[in-house]
Amino acid sequence: MKSIDIYTDGACSGNPGKGGLGVVLIYKGNRKEISEGFEETTNNRMEALAVIKGLEALKEKCSVTLYSDSKYVVDAIEKGWARKWKANGWKRNAKDKALNADLWDRMLTLLDYHDVKFIWVKGHADNIENERCDELARGAILSGNLKKDVGYRA
């Protein structure tokens, strides 16, 4: 199985507001960058969608070390919250719905296929690849080429 490093970041101008994501994939010294911008979304959605887009870019089952500065994403996976929410019909508890269930469902499917280890990195702390992802995400917002985040519900 190929081993790949994926760095991800999401950004929003306003929250909610225009959003973007940035992804850097590195395999044996080769790199691929992905960025997309969205008309109306949230920062948490962009953080989660960046992970999804990175994993969806893989053409075969891989061993992945995934770096994110999002405690929301890393904790939801590493602490088992997202799987618990799914098992509970996308509820965080008896009365509160889990936000972004559409993205968590997509991500969990990808995580069941790939062997993924999440590593939290402090944002804006001189991690060169995390900084590059931030540049990609912010650049996507400014590009004017913004898509509709079809899963976003205001």
Image (cartoon, helix red, strand yellow):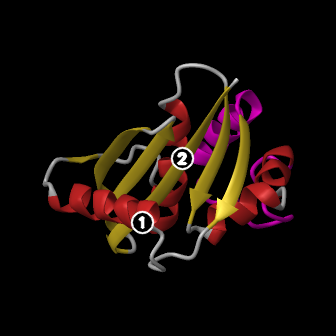
Residue 50 shows up from this direction = yes
Report crowding for label 1: few under 14, some 14 to 19, many 20 or more residues within 10 A (C-alpha).
few
Quarter of the view holding residue 96:
bottom right
Q: In this view, does 65 lie above or below 120?
A: above
Amino acid type for the residue under numbered disc 1:
Ile
Quadrant of the snapshot with the C terminus = bottom left
Residue depicted at x 57% and y 45%: 5
x, y percentage for residue 49?
A: 49, 49
Alpha carbon of mark 2 to alpha carbon of mark 1: how far?
13 Å
* Secondary-structure class at tag 2: strand
Amino acid type for the residue under numbered disc 2:
Ile
Q: Work out whether mark 2 precedes mark 1 in sequence or the reverse, and give the earlier one.
A: 2
Q: Is residue 11 above or below residue 103?
A: below
Q: Is residue 44 above or below residue 8?
A: below
Locate residue 75 relative to residue 24 in the image: left or right. right
The region drawn magenta spans 88-114
Residue under label 1, please give it.
128
Residue depicted at x 48% and y 70%: 127
Residue most extreme to the top: 60
Report crowding for label 2: few under 14, some 14 to 19, many 20 or more residues within 10 A (C-alpha).
many
* Secondary-structure class at tag 1: helix
Residue under label 2, please give it.
6
- Return the residue nearer the eye: 40 or 46: 46
- Return the residue nearer the eye: 145 or 134: 134
x, y percentage for residue 150?
A: 40, 43
x, y percentage for residue 136?
A: 30, 57
Residue most extreme to the front: 29
Residue 154 shows up from this direction = no
